[in-house]
Image (spheres, rainbow, N blue to C red):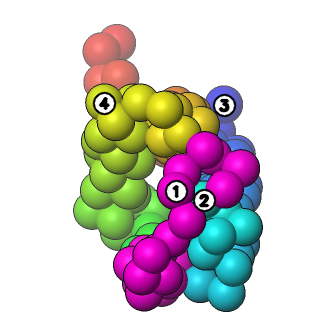
Amino acid sequence: MSTATSIKRYRVVLMISIVLNLAAGVFIMFWPDAFTTPLGQPEAFPDTWPRHWGWQLLAINALYMPGYWDPLVNRWPNWCGIVIRLSFALFFFSQGDGFVPMGIYDGLSGLALLFTYLPVVKRPSTAS
């Protein structure tokens, strides 16, 4: 697979991830209880905390954009995004209960990003 094809595939996965996170962030900012209730969480009180988390999702995803625009040059945001998602997955799994779906989402997202980013940064073999 060519580097250009790998970059396109990675960008598609990253953009899907960003859009889903932005949608979740906006949803959490404006309807925190509608987010927590289906996950079996108690009512958000005070609702400032989940709203803050929604805003943080927006901010964090803005930091991914340099890595989206040029994933070969701006590697740091991409590697950080992968590690952060996998770390959050472990955190959510450790909390149990209604956090497991969030762990599954972050874990699958992190793995999809990892497996589509590795071919982008893989260097061609110099062996003859």
Lower sequence index among marks 3 and 4: 3
Query: In the rendered image of this protein, does residue 64 appear above or below residue 36?
Result: below
Circle 2 residue: 36
Lower sequence index among marks 2 and 1: 2
Please provide percent x and percent y for residue 95: 34, 36
Q: CA distance from mark 4 to mark 1?
A: 18 Å
Query: What residue is rendered at 52% in x and 56% in y?
Result: 42
The secondary structure type at the circle numbered 1 is loop
Residue 45 visible at all: yes
Lower sequence index among marks 2 and 3: 3
Query: What residue is rendered at 42% in x and 82% in y?
Result: 46
Query: What residue is rendered at 34% in x and 12% in y?
Result: 128
Circle 1 residue: 42
Q: Which residues are magenta?
A: 37-59
Lower sequence index among marks 1 and 3: 3
Circle 4 residue: 94
Tags 2 and 1 in contact by the CB under 8 Å rule?
yes
Between label 3 and label 4, give the one nearer the viewer. 4
Q: CA distance from mark 2 to mark 1?
A: 7 Å
Give the total of numbered labels.
4
Taking the magenta stretch, the answer to whether it contains residue 48 is yes
Q: CA distance from mark 2 to mark 3?
A: 42 Å
* Residue type at numbered disc 3: Met
The secondary structure type at the circle numbered 3 is loop
Tags 2 and 4 in contact by the CB under 8 Å rule?
no
- Neighbours of disc 2 within 10 Å: few (<14), some (14-19), many (20+): some
Lower sequence index among marks 2 and 4: 2
Q: CA distance from mark 3 to mark 4?
A: 37 Å
Circle 3 residue: 1
